Each structure stands twice: as structure tokens, then as C-alpha cells.
Image: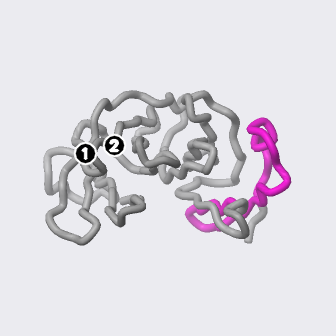
């Protein structure tokens, strides 16, 4: 469903039962494809509806949210190819429909959800939110120096310039522009 690429080229991805399709497996998984291809590896099967996935800036941690909207989990990345020490990174404050996720250069975790975008500090505390009309499905950083936030909804694409914002508190309750 979602994926992230490690600096060595390995692809980590999630596979929830999405779109009402029948299950082919009796679990939901987090997987890895080695940098030069090869056998797909199952890394975790203990999260219900794993969806958004992202690495910490130093790639020592892997964050995975669940589409049921309850938690963001974090794993330690071991030897670049295994996961260990699953734990709750943050509770999603009742937010339903957690979807795509990105981590900025400062280690803040940005989560797209049905209620907009929620931002968490590297220690798992909620920093704030960005209100977006309609359901948000994913997000990404782009533009010069990665300071433009692009937010995808079901029918719209928004952008928000983050260059003139300093500090987490200025990221809260801002309104992106439809593009």
C-alpha cells in the first residue's frame, strides 16, 4: 500500500487488506525487498492494517501507522534488514483513517488522516495539526530545500509553504492552498 526506500535501495512496504479485496494471507504485513531485488522478506505481521511507513532521518527506526487510526508504531532497524522492539510511538488521539506518513529532517512525524495532517515530535508528543477540507490520503515534502508540503486528498491536491515557519507551534492550525 505505502512504501519507503532506504538509502541502500531496499524497499520497505506495507500490505493491509485494502479496497474490500479478499485476503490472500491471514495477516497484514510489513515487508522488505533487498536493494538489488531478490526474495521479499516479511518483517512484521503484528499490526492490524499497517499503512503509512517512514524511516527516521538516520534510518535507525521505522515508523508504521495503522489505518484503524489508533497508533503509530516504531521499530528499531537491525542490520539494515530486520525489525525489532516494536512499541507504540504515539497514540493518534482518536484520529480515524491514518494513512500516509513522512518524517522531516528534524525527526518530526507527519501523518495524513481523515481529519487532516497531524505532526508528532521525535519523542512521540503531538505538536499540532493542519486542517484540510476532506479526507487526506498522503503527503510529501518537495520544492526548494524540501520546505513545501504537498497534501493529497481524494479529489484535491494542496500545498503549504513551510519556509517561513520556524518552530513546531507555527505548523499548527495553518491552512494549505488548493493547487
Would you say residue 128 is visible in this rendering?
yes
Would you say residue 64 is visible in this rendering?
no
Q: For the residue labelled by badge 2, is the local secondary structure a helix, a strand or a loop?
A: strand
- Point out the image quarter for the N terminus: bottom left
On the rendered structure, is 120 left or right of 176?
A: left
On the rendered structure, is 22 left or right of 74?
A: left
Magenta segment range?
A: 149-176
Name the residue located 33 percent from the left edge and 43 percent from the top edge.
77
Task: Identify the residue position indicated by label 1 in the image.
Answer: 82
Looking at the picture, tell me which residue is in the foreground, 175 or 11: 11
Mark 2 closeness class: few <14, some 14–19, many ≥20 residues within 10 Å: some
The answer to which quarter of the image holds residue 138 is bottom right
- Point out the image quarter for the C terminus: bottom right
Looking at the picture, tell me which residue is in the foreground, 179 or 37: 37
**Mark 2 near mark 1, Cβ–Cβ under 8 Å?**
yes
Q: For the residue labelled by badge 1, is the local secondary structure a helix, a strand or a loop?
A: strand
On the rendered structure, is 50 left or right of 143?
A: left
Task: Identify the residue position indicated by label 2 in the image.
Answer: 77
Amino acid at each position: 500500500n505505502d512504501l519507503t526506500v532506504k538509502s541502500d535501495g531496499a524497499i520497505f512496504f506495507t500490505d493491509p487488506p485494502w479496497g474490500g479485496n479478499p485476503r490472500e494471507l491471514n495477516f497484514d504485513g510489513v515487508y522488505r525487498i533487498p536493494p538489488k531485488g531478490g526474495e521479499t522478506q516479511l518483517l512484521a505481521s503484528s499490526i492490524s492494517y499497517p499503512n503509512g511507513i517512514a524511516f527516521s532521518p538516520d534510518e535507525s527506526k521505522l515508523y508504521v501507522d495503522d489505518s484503524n487510526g489508533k497508533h503509530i508504531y516504531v521499530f528499531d532497524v537491525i542490520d539494515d534488514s530486520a525489525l525489532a522492539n516494536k512499541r507504540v510511538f504515539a497514540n493518534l488521539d482518536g484520529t480515524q483513517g491514518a494513512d500516509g506518513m513522512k518524517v522531516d529532517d528534524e525527526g518530526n512525524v507527519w501523518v495524513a488522516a481523515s481529519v487532516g495532517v497531524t505532526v508528532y515530535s521525535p519523542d512521540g508528543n503531538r505538536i499540532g495539526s493542519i486542517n484540510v477540507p476532506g479526507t487526506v490520503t498522503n503527503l510529501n515534502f518537495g520544492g526548494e530545500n524540501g520546505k513545501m508540503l504537498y497534501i493529497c486528498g481524494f479529489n484535491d491536491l494542496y500545498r503549504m509553504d513551510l519556509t517561513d515557519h520556524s518552530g513546531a507551534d507555527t505548523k499548527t492550525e495553518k491552512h494549505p492552498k488548493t493547487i
